[in-house]
Image: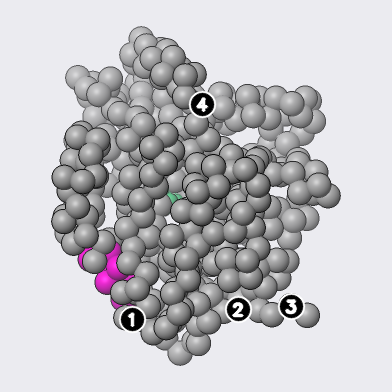
Amino acid sequence: MSKEYTCLGMMSGTSGDGVDASIIRSNGLNELTILREKYYEYDEKLFYKFHNLKKKINSLKDLKTFSSEIKKLENDITIFHAKAVKDISAGLNLDLIGFHGQTLYHNPEEKISLQLGNGNLLSQLSKKKIIFNFRKNDILNGGEGAPLTPIFHKHLIKSKKIELPACILNIGGISNLTVVGNMNDHEILSQDLGPGNCLINSWIQNNTNKKFDFGGEISSRGKVNEIILEQALEIYESNFKKKNNISLDTNDFDISFARGLSLEDGAATLTAFSAKIISTKINFLLNKHGKKIIKIIICGGGRKNTNLVKQIKLNSKKNISFYNSEDLELNGDFIESQAFGYIAIRSVLSLPISFPSTTGCNAPCSGGEAIDF
Ligand SMILES: Nc1ncnc2c1ncn2[C@@H]1O[C@H](COP(=O)(O)OP(=O)(O)O)[C@@H](O)[C@H]1O
Ligand SMILES: [Mg+2]
């Protein structure tokens, strides 16, 4: 039997809302048990420190100017993670920690993917072996450094014995899709699709004292401004046709086209915009499967935005059948943190974590730096 590790995976995604933490026991291959899971929401101070710095960086498109602020924030974020480690692992002996860190900036064209997380400091504070900097090796091997979770999505689809082709749609700040085709030849395809919650979140954060549109309730009360929507989609299409990146960052999009609309109508229009981009891309990526029924399992915080999900379903091809992660007894809040636990174990075993068909790298490659305590 292959060796199993008890590993804590910690993920903080593009929404910048907090840290999802999962302790798993796995061999990095087919065996996996979930031991504990918990969400650690950023406190107000850390939340706004992160989002304000991200906004400043995006407006100047420059990291160097902010290097000392970035270092300070990285320190705060690492300490926040260390507290989470202490809390979630009480009484358990962890073999290692998969520490993704908080993405601050991701730009595949510049070959930069910056996650805030000091592996050395977390190792000292937690007295554990840390695997971090997951995206670097993929970028060095010609990949975009994202998405990295598809290898874990494949494991889930396999372990749940879901008929192929099957997909996982993750709706975080950004949305991404993993398509698992023929299991025998390890066919996985993945791509970031477009905005997930990021535009809706920005709109709500700019116009209310809330952080997101709970249940999609605000957008459901609004009316989509069809003229603005159509114009925004046209501009988006022409900008992205040129790029066709596999991976995206929240700074690839902006909400300025909604200004002037009421809170509800702006939320409705931005929700419709996000849903349209997601479903158009899904239809395009699944086109080659013809009329075959394809299952899509929806996970990530955005699955709880009922209006967004409803519109994605409405715009998608009729041969796609959607499931909520919970329908398959998967907790859709923690798939990404489980993934980074699983990926950390694969990193220790030098197994590949990214593939030409997932990140565009030249050959399957492992990744992640290890810091032993
Ligand atoms: N109850 C809810 N209703 C609507 N949206 C929600 C709800 N819960 C979470 N979300 C959305 O999900 C986001 C967090 O999802 P998450 O999967 O953690 O994304 P990320 O990986 O980008 O951090 C929140 O910022 C919010 O937009
Ligand atoms: Mg999150």
Q: Above or below — where is 259 with respect to 173?
A: above
Gap in Å between the C-alphas at discs 1 and 2? Answer: 20 Å
**Circles 1 and 3 in contact, beta carbons < 8 Å:** no
Gap in Å between the C-alphas at discs 1 and 3? Answer: 29 Å
Residue named by callout 1: 124
Residue named by callout 4: 244
Q: Earlier in the sequence, mark 4 or mark 1?
A: 1
**What residue is at 42 percent from the left and 34 percent from the top?**
109
Q: Earlier in the sequence, mark 4 or mark 2?
A: 2
Residue named by callout 2: 5
Amino acid type, label 2: Tyr
Q: Residue 72 location, x and y as percent?
A: 18, 62
SS at badge 4: loop
Gap in Å between the C-alphas at discs 4 and 1? Answer: 41 Å
Amino acid type, label 3: Ser
**Circles 4 and 1 in contact, beta carbons < 8 Å:** no
Gap in Å between the C-alphas at discs 2 and 3? Answer: 10 Å
Q: Which residues are magenta?
A: 76-83
SS at badge 2: strand
Residue named by callout 3: 2
Q: Residue 347 location, x and y as percent?
A: 57, 66
